[in-house]
Image (cartoon, rainbow, N blue to C red):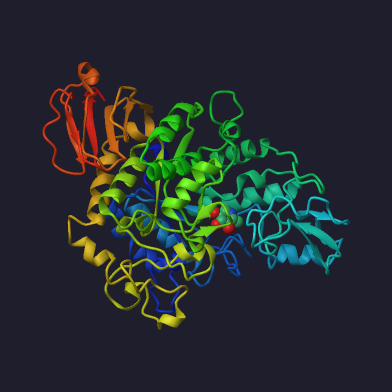
Amino acid sequence: MGDRWYSEAVIYCLDVETYADSDGDGVGDIRGLIGRLDYLARLGVTCIWLSPIHPSPNKDDGYDATDFYNVDPRLGTLGDFAELLHQAQNRGIRVIIDLVVNHTSDEHPWFQSARSSPDSAYRDWYIWSEEAPDDRHQGMVFPGEQNETWSYDRTAKAWYYHRFYKFQPDLNMANPKVREEVKKIMSFWLQLGVSGFRMDAVPFIIELTEPGNPNSPKDMEFLTELRQHVQWRRGDAVLLAEANVEPDQLPVYFGDGSGSGNRIHMLFDFMLNGRLMLALAREDPETIIDALRDTPKLPTGGQWATFLRNHDEIDLSRLTTDQRNDVLAKFGPDEEMQLYGRGIRRRLAPMLGNDRRHIELAYALQFSLRGTPVLRYGEEIGMGEDLSLKGRDAIRTPMQWSYQPNGGFSTAEPEKLVRPVLDTGEFSYEKVNVTAQRKDPRSLLGWFERMIRTLREAPEIGSGSTTHIDVPLPAGVLAHRADGPTGTMVFLHNLGTEDVEVDLSTLQPEADLPVDVLSDRGYDEVGKLDRLKLAGHGYRWIRLCRSWSV
Ligand code: NOJ
């Protein structure tokens, strides 16, 4: 199992431009991040996922690249990046980067050449139609901000396809040259030393778009090809994909059904994300139990990546209307908190009313569920959002390091900052920052450090199976277990606000020396597992037994 490092990883995602600014120009940079690696090592994360780092006009926060073989000069140089890899490795931290190859920026030289003439060598790198396709007003990912998926380009005198914004023309994956180029890009970064890729928009990468056909076929084999390629170049490299598709589609992203996963190693669990939010909103674990039961069996090497928050809105589109309304009513009641009619543009702490016990409960739950946990920067100190910013920028404000001006993110004048630092209200940098929390072991940051270290002592969570413990329990309580070669962990989480008592004595025959390894407070000894007290919003992680032979 040790070879599958990603199964036991704790992934931390950040955007270099909002993390730490080393040269005072108002934009976070790679050298700033290098200076914070010790902080990340202490937090206990084992892998960082960097949002896009390539040169870009930044109309979609870097998800619109103009050069896949370089680093945005605002963030540093390729030399700085190589140094980051070295310094991270010294601290046992791996780095994966966002690979955004479904599309380029419309300012990318490939697109500029493609549009300039039908004879351009790059014309067929994009997807064109001479006529206006009938389905051009279908399939928009950003409804409200985007009103078509095909736009007319006057220079090209043709329509081009863009699944996302108009300035993000889709690359044509039916073209073998484009496929080769994608592999070359991956090879380049692997050669530099990244441990893999967070692959953006995978369902669209494999789409073989046909004008007029809103259900164009998908070429799953391309994923097999990419996996093979990546694995030949670097045996332990990982593909972590964004594929927010119907649950019955998920298995084919992991593999072709032959048993061993031969496509994507890890998929973000969007379904669980929505259900976690629903369970928290309703104080009822039922949907999580369903998720544990319904999860398709993964092929060897396949793994889920769990998350509560990321850099996008919380996408509730896979919930039913009633379910979605319950989550919105609880966590995003004001229209300004909502986005695209399907999501919430908020961070977790404000959604949970900045209630420390509730925040701990939510993260203890996420981290204990099956899969590899992914944590968004700033969540470990309970940062808030800035709803005065446009769209998803609300949750992309700079990291709050200290009491210093700009929260210690940058020494630039505030108006020069890439995005304003939160400086008012209960989430302002003066109230929420790393410096304050670092010296207080009872802080949320201190709790995250402890929780992550406990998790790393419990490899069952990432590599073992996770199942619901199906015994009668008080309302609001979820009991689940993780079994692996190293032993068994049992988890109790109380989503409700009432104090309760839980009877897990049926597990007693399996227990050797059951002990609380993480809990919201000091509870009485575990005893015979028959009278386990659990406070409202409380949690207990109990080690049931350890296999001493391993
Ligand atoms: C998904 C990313 O998560 C999102 O932030 C981005 O806007 C789109 N893909 C387009 O690349």
Q: Which residue is drawn at 53% across and 71% down?
A: 73
Farthest residue in the top direction?
Answer: 509
Q: Is residue 176 above or below residue 64?
A: above
Q: What percent of the width, then of the height, locates residue 296?
A: 51, 28
In the rendered structure, the answer to whether residue 329 lies left or right of residue 436 reads right
Tell me, yes or no, if residue 95 can be seen here: no
Q: Residue at x 44, y 58 (%)?
A: 346
Instruction: Answer with the quarter of the image where residue 497 lies.
Output: top left
Nearest the eye: 48 or 135: 135
In the rendered structure, the answer to whether residue 248 lies left or right of residue 150 reads left
Q: Which residue is drawn at 38% across and 58% down?
A: 377
Q: In terms of image quarters, where does ligand 1 lie?
A: bottom right
Q: What percent of the width, then of the height, locates residue 185?
A: 61, 53
Q: What percent of the width, then of the height, locates residue 64?
A: 62, 62
Q: Residue at x 30, y 43 (%)?
A: 364
Q: How many marks?
A: 0
Q: What percent of the width, then of the height, locates residue 27?
A: 45, 73
Quadrant containing the C terminus in the rendered view: top left
Nearest the eye: 82 or 440: 440
Tell me, yes or no, if residue 274 can be seen here: yes
Quadrant containing the N terminus in the rendered view: top left
In the rendered structure, the answer to whether residue 117 lies left or right of residue 145 reads right
Q: In this view, does 29 lie above or below 252?
A: below
